Amino acid sequence: QVQVVESGGGLVQAGGSLRLSCAASGGTFQVGWFRQAPGKERDFVAAISRSGGSTYYADSVKGRFTISRDGARNTVYLQMNSLKAEDTAVYYCAATPVYGPIASITTTRDYRYWGQGTQVTVSS
């Protein structure tokens, strides 16, 4: 049985940092992070390959966010620095068993398994 569980959200001031964690069990996956602000669509943030050797970012977070995974390759992290008010959203971790270039899996339809989401609020 596949489980995807996020943790690490919270309230932070603009310019601050947060690290989100995603534990994906029950298989090996390529993993992505998405976010959804109130009244908006769920948008791609970042993705990482099974090996951790390939990553891909949305332009809006490039240079500020870093996606990584641990040596056991079953926990993925999203380090978020220089946070802005517009980063406020519910952040979702998603996993896919599909093989392929990371840059090609950037929509919600590309991912089969989803976590419950974790709230990130950045105060200005």
Image (cartoon, rainbow, N blue to C red):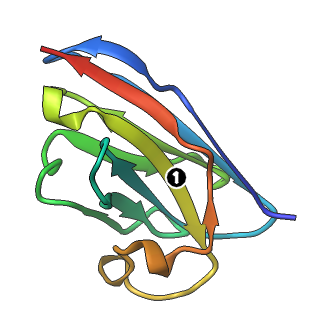
Q: Which residue is at 77% across, 69% downward? A: 27
Q: Which of the two residues, 40 or 63, is positioned nearer the viewer here?
A: 40
Q: Residues within 10 Å of mark 1 (few under 14, many from 20)?
A: many
Q: Secondary structure at mark 1?
A: strand
Q: Which residue is at 27% across, 32% downward? A: 88
- Name the residue at the right extreme: 1
| Residue 92 position within the rendered picture, expressed as x and y whole percent measured from the top left | 48, 49
In the image: residue 77, left or right of residue 103: right
Residue underneath mark 1: 93
The N terminus sits in image quarter: bottom right
Q: Which residue is at 39% across, 79% downward? A: 105
The C terminus sits in image quarter: top left
Residue 65 falls in image quadrant: top left
In the image: residue 53, left or right of residue 2: left
| Residue 63 position within the rendered picture, expressed as x and y whole percent measured from the top left | 13, 45
Q: Which residue is at 41% across, 39% downward? A: 90
Q: Which of the two residues, 39 or 115, is positioned nearer the viewer here?
A: 39
Can residue 84 be seen by looking at this rendering?
A: no
Residue 37 falls in image quadrant: top left
- Name the residue at the front extreme: 39
Can residue 9 be seen by looking at this rendering?
A: yes
Total marks drawn?
Answer: 1
As drawn, 110 above or below 69: below
In the image: residue 92, left or right of residue 86: right
| Residue 80 position within the rendered picture, expressed as x and y whole percent measured from the top left | 29, 33
Q: Amino acid at mark 1?
A: Cys
| Residue 121 position within the rendered picture, expressed as x and y whole percent measured from the top left | 32, 23
